[in-house]
């Protein structure tokens, strides 16, 4: 079960056509993108060799990825999106836009906008 932590509207927020939305939700999203496990990670190998040359040894591979953080806004006059719809939309953003699904895996965390 995923719990969406968020904060509501302390003040009206401008939206469509300059009107003020009566309700809005801001959710902080963190997306972690890493190379697929079965693919070679040349950056990770370089870091691993550099660490070993300095006397730091790792048990497994070193993988280099990226972290993307952003706030998502959800506007709705009647009710906010259900958590399921929100997570489906977020998954689509990650899959179609942020991640190259041929060579990368992703996961995301949803937290408070504080």
Image: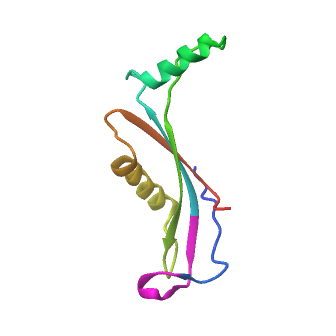
Q: Which residue is drawn at 45% across and 40% down?
A: 106
Residue 93's spot in the image, x, y percent?
39, 54
Q: Viewer-proximal residue, 80 or 36?
A: 36
Instruction: State the image quarter where residue 88 is shown.
Output: bottom left
Q: Does the stretch in magenta take in 29?
A: no
Quadrant showing the C terminus: bottom right
Q: Residue at x 40, y 48 (%)?
A: 98
Q: Tell me if residue 35 comes above or below residue 61 in the rendering.
A: below
Is residue 100 toward the left or the right of residue 4 in the image?
left
Residue 27's spot in the image, x, y percent?
57, 62
Q: Residue at x 35, y 32 (%)?
A: 103
Is residue 6 toward the left or the right of residue 18 in the image?
right
Residue 68's spot in the image, x, y percent?
51, 48
Is residue 93 toward the left or the right of residue 57 in the image?
left
Q: What stretch is highlighted in magenta?
A: 14-26
Q: Residue at x 46, y 87 (%)?
A: 18
Is residue 84 toward the left or the right of residue 38 in the image?
right
Residue 51's spot in the image, x, y percent?
60, 17
């Amino acid at each position: 079960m995923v719990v969406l932590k968020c904060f509501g509207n302390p003040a009206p927020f401008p939206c469509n056509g300059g009107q003020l939305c009566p309700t809005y939700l801001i959710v902080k999203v963190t997306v972690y993108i890493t190379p697929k496990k079965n693919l070679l990670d040349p950056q990770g190998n370089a870091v691993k060799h550099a660490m070993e040359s300095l006397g730091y040894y790792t048990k497994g591979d070193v993988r280099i990825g990226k972290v993307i953080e952003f706030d998502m806004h959800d506007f709705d006059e009647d009710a906010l999106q259900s958590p399921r719809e929100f997570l489906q939309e977020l998954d689509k953003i990650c899959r179609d836009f942020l991640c190259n699904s041929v060579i990368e895996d992703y996961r995301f965390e949803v937290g408070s906008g504080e």
